[in-house]
Amino acid sequence: MARGAVGHTREEIVVQVKNKEASVKEYGSYIPIKNAVSKIKKWVDQGAEIVYLTSRRNLKEVGEIKEVLRRNMFLVGTLEYRKGLEEYKDVAERVMPDILVEDDCESIGGEKEMTYPHIGESKRQRIRSVVVKEFGGIDELPDNIDLLKTVTQ
């Protein structure tokens, strides 16, 4: 989340994004939401391969996101981004994760802005979708990767 969101409720942060608060576009200053780093570490310790997806396509912005991951000690994984004319769903289809954890995109339009609903049907059947509230974090998701595969929306 943007650094300007610190100290604000999830609902207030959604309003910040909708109102285009300046820090929202300062990708290099982003910080983890709650205990995301430790949650991901638990999954990696169980053998999960983490692939981070960003909707950014500008290489400067992608570099800023990479730096945020490094600086905040997110575990090593690849960062995939939109290339050329790709849409966000194209990135997910290229990666084909077993589990796609994404937020509900409340601040930017909801489901129509999410990734999973736009993935082609045959590919969507092979990906487990786990949706969390935007800016709510992933702390409430199971630590156990096998249980994560059974989360229902």
Image: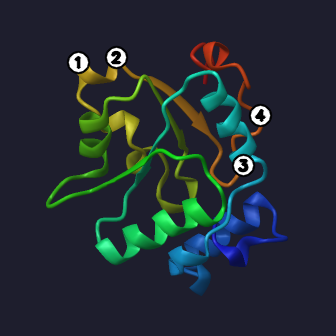
98 left or right of 32 in image: left
132 left or right of 129 in image: right
Instruction: Identify which residue is drawn at 46% across, 73% down.
Output: 64
Q: Quadrant of the C terminus?
A: top right
The amino acid type found where label 3 is placed reads Gly
Q: Residue 28: x, y in percent?
A: 54, 76
Task: Calculate the distance from the C-alpha at mark 1 to the C-alpha at mark 2.
Answer: 7 Å
Q: Quadrant of the N terminus?
A: bottom right
77 left or right of 125 in image: right
Q: Earlier in the sequence, mark 3 or mark 2?
A: 2
Q: Secondary structure at mark 3?
A: loop
Q: Secondary structure at mark 4?
A: loop
Q: Residue 54: x, y in percent?
A: 41, 56
> Quick check: 129 above or below 12?
above
Query: Can you name the residue that lies furthest to the bottom here?
Result: 22
Q: Earlier in the sequence, mark 1 or mark 3?
A: 1
Instruction: Identify which residue is drawn at 60% across, 82% down.
Output: 23
- Residue corresponding to mark 4: 140
